[in-house]
Image (spheres, rainbow, N blue to C red):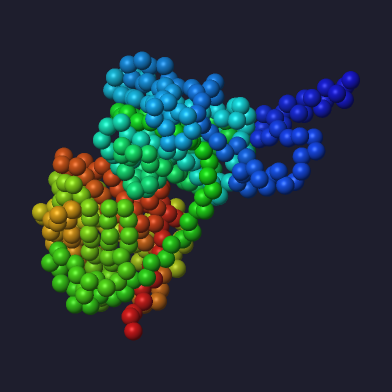
Amino acid sequence: MKALFTVLGLTALLSACNVFREAALYEQEADDAKTPNIAGFYALQVYRDQMSDEVWYTPSPKALKVQAESAQKAEGSQSISIEWNKQADPQTWLGLGFGWNGWTGKNFEAITQQAALSFWVKSKEGQSAGLPWAVGFEDFNGAQAWTGVTSGFIQGGLVKNEWTEVKIPLSVFPFEARDVDVTIIKQLIVQFEASGKVWIDNIRLVPYQSKGRQTHPVSPGENIVIDGQPTEREWFVQPFEMTFAKVWLSWDDTHLYLAAQVEDASPLINTRSDKDIWNGDALELALSTVSGTNSQRKVFYPTDLHLGISMAEAPVVFEWNKKKVIEGAKVLTRKTVTGYTAEAAIPWKSLGTTPFEPNQAYGCEVAVDIANEASVRTLQTRWKSPEQEGFHTDPSLWGQIIYRIQK
């Protein structure tokens, strides 16, 4: 009898800490291969078709309304309708949670680099570049790891009035930094800010291969004329391609050159100055100026640059690492039918460094800030880290560029 209780106790403990599937006594190996899984993880479906006791949300009739919706669905028989307004109840935390797989502990250990959280969303009114949500996973100890829902996670960069997939790699959640035990994940939580009305559906974990360190080739410029209108003859080098933007980078013995082509409904609006120019239309460029610098460092070195160029009638170039305006730069912009173009020449001397050496690799990240008519940034689109914010403090998120002289 004592042995029986020991076995039962051990079974209960394991059930609370791992993901099990029901199986027949003589289940064949072939059945495992047919069951959807990622690296042996089977609890892939977080929500589909049913508002069960695994789903909870903050009771706030004035600020949050969550209900099943059968008239709208991306797949299956129903979605979840969500309408929220944080200002209607500012003192109350607004959230929605999913303790899927029967509230058991889910072991993410093998999938943090191989899976992404996916869900489908449809706006009830208008469109937006991202969602004012924080999304997090909580373990059974109460530790949580969060990330925002920015445009880089959204197919096409916009939440609109048609079903669109949002895909957030598990690798962007700071599990280790927040001491989250990934072997006992309890639930998924969504925190709401601002306001909005959407439907969401088919929340699940899907296979996803995290990107390695991207490398971008850059060549010296030839006959670049700074007139705000980049041409293929000047900018024959490969651009950095981002949602809503393309940016070109080049250099010669005297200047670092940039050019941009940006889609922007309210172009060239930036009323900010100096260190605050990020909060308006702007270009940002982060660079290491010494080849071979540790690519995994989490802090800026004195030799790193973080440049910002305000896109306005009187552009300003600011360097955040040295906290100063860069003198002697020439920047010109032009409005286009879809937004604007820009060109810039920045003297190496003003940057306090020397031209980059051919065939050497340097850390790099490129970003474009897009603002509304009030000069408030509503979107930042990035080259290497479109899915994860923080390149302005964490160089490990950068890619790299290799300068090659064209033959």
Q: Is residue 138 visible?
A: no
Image quadrant holding the C terminus, namely bottom left
Q: Is 261 rendered above or below residue 371?
A: below
**Hey, which residue is sitting farthest bottom in the picture?**
407
In this view of the protein, which residue sits in the foreground, 27 or 8?
Answer: 27
Q: Is residue 5 visible?
A: yes
In this view of the protein, which residue sits in the foreground, 68 or 108?
Answer: 68
**Hey, which residue is sitting farthest right in the picture?**
1
**Hey, which residue is sitting farthest left in the picture?**
313
Q: Is 323 rendered above or below residue 376?
A: below
79 left or right of 224 in image: right
What residue is rendered at 43% in x and 36% in y? 74
- What percent of the width, then of the height, locates residue 255? 23, 71
What residue is rendered at 52% in x and 53% in y? 209
- What percent of the width, then of the height, locates residue 285? 30, 58
For residue 1, which quarter of the picture?
A: top right
What residue is rendered at 28% in x and 67% in y? 249
- What percent of the width, then of the height, locates residue 117? 49, 41
